[in-house]
Image (spheres, rainbow, N blue to C red):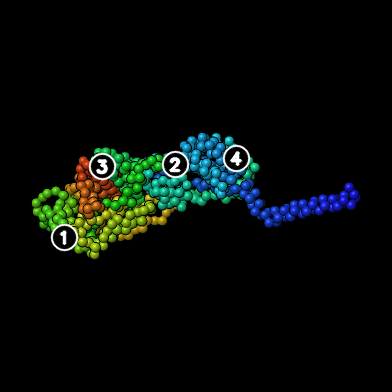
Amino acid sequence: MSQRAANRRIRLLGVVLALALAVALAKAAWVQVVEGASLAKRAQAQQIGTVPIPSNRGSILDRNGVELATNDSETITISADPTLVQKLGSPARESSQAAQILGFDTAGETALLKALSARSSGFAYVERQAPADQARALERLKLPGFSYVSDPKRIYPQGALASQVVGYAGIDNRGITGLESFYDKKLSGQSGKQTVVRDPSGQIIDVQNTRDEKPGADLTLTLDNVIQLDVQQILKQTLIDQQAHSATAVVIDPHSGDVLAMATAPGYDANSVPVVPASYLPNRAVTDTYEPGSTFKLVTVAGALSDGVVTPQTEFTLPYSITVGDKTIHDAHPRGTERMSVSQILARSSNIGAITISELLGKERLARWISAFGFGKPTGIDFPRESAGIVAPPDKWYGSDAGTIPIGQGIAVTPIQLVAAYAAIANGGVWVQPRLVSRINGKATTAPKKRRVVTPYVAGELMHLLRNVVDEGTGAKAKISGYSVAGKTGTAAKPDPKTGGYTNEYVASFVGIVPASKPRLVILVTVDDPHRSIYGGDVAAPAFTEIALDCLRYLEIPPDHAG
């Protein structure tokens, strides 16, 4: 080969090498300048991640400091970064190992595999609030991309005690029903988060920054755990004795509006909510309505006394039945035409007497008194989904409404509305808004609203009339030795929504005030669809007596009556 040819080949090789170097430099420049930010971001995403830190939900305590809802600190939430699982491990292997330790069924393992295989996700829950021993066993396997954070689980130490009032919180630390729902924002607090750095195997090696979680506030209720438990046990036995569908009771302090007990039977253990029948969950004292029957006659008589239409001694000649509009109404028990005073009408729970009084009062004035006592609108008690009841305006009273509404039919109320109305009479004529929470993080809540409904004089007259109901009338089974009792029985057929008429089922009720001379407690008991008897005096009054007597002893309220 000539020298010239050799030089030409060397020059050609140099050009090729120069071109190759230029291409390499150009590629490096492209990667550094154009793709650098994107690649850096992808690299950082593989090394840095965010882990949520759940806040500690506030506790719910009764008035004595007994925990009704709190948190189990021995639970851990397990999460994973699917991108790291896919890069550093195997979604199939990791999901199989996790499912075995955590006790997942086939469906659970399949769902986890799908989550860990998601290409666009940087976060997935493996198990929320797992038992600590299982979480620690899984952590020892050092599965790539898995994280473990303490996440207290909501528990209810007293089981079924006040479960319908307290309600329950879901796994995401959010209240679902009851006070857990109503005060959810205060109870929840604020979650935090950590920005963590992982090593090439996906394990956390550093925490760059942390936003601390803020614990939720504690609630102190007006409920008394001793009274609440007693009420629940008595209601449970009442259901058995009366072969009834359900029962509700409320115990309230008429002066403060504090609800000392509020219960519905059947009840349930709040720790077992997923398997509890949905019909057991509502707090029927606040959310459900019923026709009150004769317990509502208090409103009719209160209005007539206040407007000067009658006095307790006013007498009427009353037939056994009367026709109002398109309906013939009669008294509960057959009798001849009799002359009765207002006092006797209430004591004997005469429908005809109450309607006669109402006719003197007139529907417009009666409607105003119904509103004054709080019916047809929520009481404002601190509880979710409170019903306003069903009260038609007087211009919508048709047919027999002018005869049925004064005796508690054709109108629907809640137990809390009715007990608040009787509490207004018990404390001298002032309606007090009922409440369930007295303190939040130790600080007193806003004082309940108050308004005068009747004068002290009229309230005193009504108390005397209600004492006669127990002493001489339909409430005889509500008597308590050594204590004066005022109250009213109620028996109401349940309406049939399909026909617009009434069924053969009844709600039996009794509302009582004790001691009548210096009221400390107002107690309401309703029993839905009893089968041994339908009358409030036979079904609900005995339950009232048991509850009242136990409360009087527990609260050490001295006797006020020689009988």
Question: Pointer 3 and pointer 2: residues touching (CB < 8 Å)?
Answer: no
Look at mark 1 in the image and give the residue it sits on.
Answer: 325
**Residue type of the residue flagged with mark 1:** Gly
Pointer 3: residues within 10 angstroms few (<14), some, or many (20+)? many
* Rendered image quadrant of residue 342: bottom left
The circle on residue 160 is none
Of the numbered discs 4 and 3, the one sitting upstream in the chain is 4
Pointer 1: residues within 10 angstroms few (<14), some, or many (20+)? few
Of the numbered discs 2 and 4, the one sitting upstream in the chain is 4
Q: Residue furthest right?
A: 3
Look at mark 4 in the image and give the residue it sits on.
Answer: 89
| Residue 115 position within the rendered picture, expressed as x and y whole percent measured from the top left | 52, 44
| Residue 83 position within the rendered picture, expressed as x and y whole percent measured from the top left | 59, 45
Task: Give the secondary structure at mark 3.
Answer: loop
- Give the left or right position of residue 9, taking residue 214 as reference: right
Question: Pointer 4 and pointer 1: residues touching (CB < 8 Å)?
Answer: no
Look at mark 3 in the image and give the residue it sits on.
Answer: 244
The circle on residue 155 is 2
The residue lying at 52 percent from left, 50 percent from top is 191
| Any part of residue 428 in sight | no
Task: Give the secondary structure at mark 2.
Answer: strand
- Residues 347 and 362: in front is 362
**Residue type of the residue flagged with mark 3:** Ala
The residue lying at 51 percent from left, 41 percent from top is 112
**Residue type of the residue flagged with mark 2:** Ile
- Residues 107 and 237: in front is 107
Q: CA distance from mark 4 to mark 1?
A: 81 Å
| Residue 441 position within the rendered picture, expressed as x and y whole percent measured from the top left | 46, 50
| Any part of residue 97 in sight | yes
Q: CA distance from mark 2 to mark 4?
A: 36 Å
